[in-house]
Image (cartoon, rainbow, N blue to C red):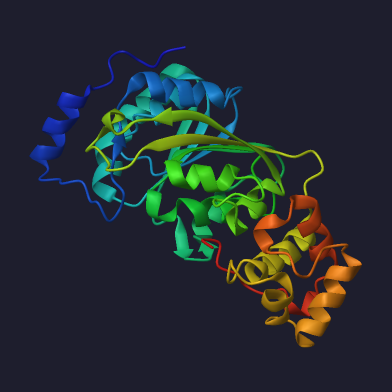
Amino acid sequence: MSADAAWPDGDEWRRRLEAEGFRPSRRLGQNFLIDATRCEAIAALAEPLRGMFVLEIGVGLGFLTRHLLARGARVFGVEFDRRLADLSRDDLVAQAEAGGGTYNLLVADALATKSSLAPDLLAALPRDADWQVVSNLPYAVASPLLVLLARTPRPPAAMTALVQLEVAARIAARPKSADYGALSVRLQAAYHVTVALRVPPGAFRPRPKVDSAVVRLVRRALAPDAGELGRLDAVTSAAFAQRRKRLRNNLGAMLPGGTAEAEELCRRAEVDPAARAEELDLAAFGRLAAGWPPELVRGFDPAD
């Protein structure tokens, strides 16, 4: 299924932006995915979309958005830059009408703080129906956004996100690899993860200096509940605090009983206290989390 062929091409968008005196911001990660074939491939990965609530963070000029709308999605977009939002709004509303979907836009930062989503974004998310995330995420905040979205009251059934290649590698990493860390555990605990598509710099304007990839996350049928995930987040923060240190030291630094309590926690979880965090699989982290003291569950940095 292809989007409306009347959509302005890259040259026309460049003229519009130049007329507005607009210059893409590297700080805001404004690298627009203009390759229609890859936009279509991302939308296809997220099917079925007709009638589905889809959150897209970083709408930009809507190159990906129009492919979601052409498939009948109910797109709720978030865009920080009001100039981009205003430039693309009318075209995207028309595309929604043509494709049988809907388009609503929040002009705001998706993050209220580095560890919390914007209240207006949270309020817009469905509480009684499945929904998805499909986004070309701003690279600087992709990791915390994915983790925070996975911790919402009704988490997305799936997330299809274009991110920096090294972030995709961290999300999908397996134990005993250099990329495996807190981000891997936090997302894989609740989602099946695959790296679905490589995207070269030439697919963007302006061209980024790094390669990118589309990561696809599908929620597990028996995903941990909110309480279990809270303990898991606390355990991973402690376990990966200093990668070269052993669990007894890293966990002990957070427990009131120090290394002795950490060793007892590991013993009950059938985990070697002399192991390093990168050696543990998801099941081992789940057992450690089950024994983690609930009073030590507090805010964490989702970008870890």
Q: Position of residue 146 (x, y in %)?
A: 55, 50
Q: Residue at x 67, y 49 (%)?
A: 175
Q: Nearer the viewer, residue 144 or 245?
A: 245
Q: Position of residue 220 (x, y in %)?
A: 75, 40
Vertical position of residue 198 compared to residue 279: above or below:
above
Q: Nearer the viewer, residue 200 or 94?
A: 200
Vertical position of residue 76 compared to residue 51: above or below:
below
Q: Residue at x 80, y 71 (%)?
A: 292
Is residue 113 visible in the rendered image? The answer is yes
Vertical position of residue 253 compared to residue 276: above or below:
below
Q: Nearer the viewer, residue 186 or 82?
A: 186
Task: Tell me the quadrant of the picture where the C terminus can be found.
Answer: bottom right
Tell which residue pokes out farthest to the right in this image.
268
Is residue 107 visible in the rendered image? The answer is no
The quadrant in which residue 186 appears is: bottom right
Q: Position of residue 116 (x, y in %)?
A: 53, 64
Q: Nearer the viewer, residue 95 or 172?
A: 172
The quadrant in which residue 16 appears is: top left
Q: Residue at x 79, y 60 (%)?
A: 228
Q: Position of residue 54 (x, y in %)?
A: 54, 36
Number of callouts in the render? 0
Q: Is residue 116 left or right of residue 188?
A: left
Q: Is residue 190 left or right of residue 107?
A: right
Tell which residue pokes out farthest to the front in this image.
274
